[in-house]
Amino acid sequence: LYSSVTAKLGKLLNTGSDVITMSGEGMLILWGALKSCLGRGDRLLCIDTGVFGGGFADMGAAIGCQAEKVSFAPDSTINQGEAMQRIEDAVKRFRPKMITVVHCETPSGTINPLAELGALKERLGVPLLCVDAVSSLGGLEVRADDWNVDILMGGSQKCLSAPPSMCFASVSARAWDEAQKVGYSGYDSFLSFKNAHKAVFPYTPYRQGTAALNEALDMIFEEGLEACFARHARVAGEA
């Protein structure tokens, strides 16, 4: 069941990277990503276009990182005005190990296009791009590999319409390398799930939550991704 779910998530995320799932609400995977790939003193650059984008800086500071924000108005996105230039300037000056960004800010509903940011990350040699797609996945197309995203995170709630009991992430080879260097081994450690596809789990897996997520994914693929995206766009236009 676990392997079936991660394969379907990989298809939804458009990634050939490993996908891991954990028992817990979406915030668990966000904390897990930071604690697994960042050590004390590492530099974290947070793209702040709302509550959750800015919140990454607080999370990074809590685990001892040097966290800096590039902040924008909560109703704006990174493809407006001089936003990308500001981000590029910050990357060149701050030289972060990781950039974080939220694909869809839940309170405002704004969408950050990510292709250009991923290309910038590659061009400037930033090791990791970490994306919160909790509220967009299943409602919008997400292309983790094409956008050069190293860790793309989601949850079973929101557009997937399953209970808020499961969270997951795609993990690139580069992200695994950084996780190995950091060596974090807590409850939300990514390394603990490196061999979960072989049924080697760090704790008792939540079968009911995994089954619910599996059913939700089957329903989305049965409807068809394009039809699913169009339905969400139509409802958003009527709001």
Image: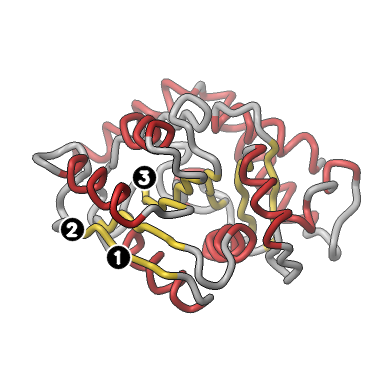
| Residue 156: mark in rendering | none
Most extreme residue toward the front is: 93
User: Which element type, helix, strand or loop, lies under badge 2?
Assistant: loop
Q: Secondary structure at mark 3?
A: loop
State how the image is colored: secondary structure
Q: Nearer the viewer, residue 48 or 124?
A: 124
Indicate the quadrant where residue 119 lies: top left
First-in-chain label (2 vs 3): 2
- Circle 3: residue type: His
Q: Which residue is mark 3?
A: 103
Q: Which residue is mark 2?
A: 74
Secondary structure at numbered mark 1: helix
The foreground one among 63 and 236 is 63
Mark 2 belongs to which amino acid?
A: Pro
Looking at the image, which residue sits at the far left? 81
Across and down, in percent, residue 105 comes to: 31, 53
- 192 sits left or right of 179 in the view: right
Tags 2 and 1 touching, CB below 8 Å: yes
- Identify the residue shown where x is 52% and y is 24%: 223
Of 117 and 76, the residue lying toward us: 117
| Lower sequence index among marks 3 and 1 | 1
Tell me if 136 is positioned left or right of 113 in this view.
right
Q: Is residue 229 above or below residue 189?
A: above
Residue depicted at 57% across the width and 62% down the height: 38
Q: Which mark is residue 51?
A: 1
Can you give x and y, in whole percent of width and height, for residue 40 in the image? 55, 72
